[in-house]
Image (cartoon, rainbow, N blue to C red):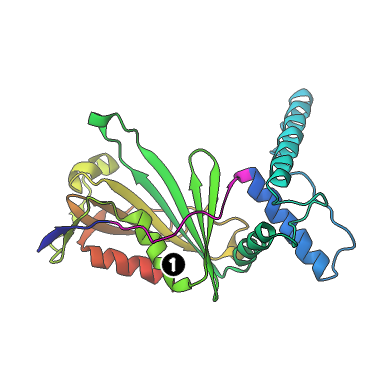
Amino acid sequence: MTQTHETRPRPGVAPIVVLTLLELAILTEAHRIGTLLEAGELEHATSPPTTPPIPTDARASAAVDEAARAAHAQARSSLQARGLLGADGLVPQDTRSGQVLTTLLDVMALATSVVVVERIVGAIEERDVPERHSTRALHLCDLAAVVQDLTDEGLVALDLLLDPGEAAGALVDVVLPPDVRDASDAGGPDRVLGPAGAESLPDLLDRPTVLVETMVIHPDEDDDPAAHPGPATPSTLLALGPGGCFLAHRTAGAPPTAYRPVSVREIQDHLGSLCR
């Protein structure tokens, strides 16, 4: 039996806050300092600016440093205007927005694992729609989860799931395209890459609409796992579209040589297993 799967968004879900990467870095540091102050491990708040790597040339170094300071000051002003950062450089605890933001940052800091899903939606040439890239990271702990969406525009959208059982659904939402063909009797031989390698993938996998890579990272192995997962991290590659669903495993950074035909149910089970 073959049917088309329609992705239905979870009701009422919208990002709690949308930030730039620099704003998130500032808030993360402010949250860290606030936590240390609360624990009595600091006497006063000190929040050094976040700056990019400094070039070796002295004049270029000064220019970059000045630009970084200006960007940092602008980001802080924006956060303060939106009530997300206090004049003392800390996340405010006397406002609802500050309390909600603290909960988000708490969960991200306490996460025992982070599920990273990188997605490419193919271009639609006849409608002049370009290829699109996006990343969703799930920060998981026992009592809650944070959904972190990263866009090509450098924006970060954060949402809070008070029921960790909803985490798998947050992955299904972004992985399964509306036009995916669900063959419940999926099977048959693996699709093996030929001499042309990755260039032959579109035809080999029946022109998939969406390509996905999933991986699980433990925060104690990386300061910012959602931003730069290591090439040696084991991952799973998925290809989905009207031609069906295909799955391959990659280990130690080596590209897979074969993709296995699977059903939508197997894709959903795989995504659920990443959240356990």
Residue furthest right as drawn: 43
Front residue (pair 141, 165):
165
Give the side of residue 129 with respect to residue 27, left or right: left
Give the x, y percent position of residue 211. 32, 49
Which element is circle 1 on?
helix
Q: Position of residue 134 (x, y in %)?
A: 43, 46
User: Which quarter of the rendering shows the C terminus?
Assistant: bottom left
Residue 141 makes an appearance in the image: yes
* Dominant secondary structure (helix, strand or loop) of the stretch shown in magenta: loop
* Residue annotated with mark 1: 167
Residue 23 percent coordinates (x, y): 66, 46
Check residue 15 for magenta coloring. Answer: yes
> Residue 268, relative to residue 90: is it above or below?
below
The number of numbered badges drawn on the structure is 1
Kind of residue indicated by mark 1:
Ala
Q: Position of residue 125 (x, y in %)?
A: 25, 31
Residues in magenta, as a range: 7-21
Q: Residues within 10 Å of mark 1 (few under 14, many from 20)?
A: many
- Quadrant (top left/top right/bottom left/bottom right) for the N terminus: bottom left
Residue projecting furthest to the top? 59
107 vs 134: above or below: below
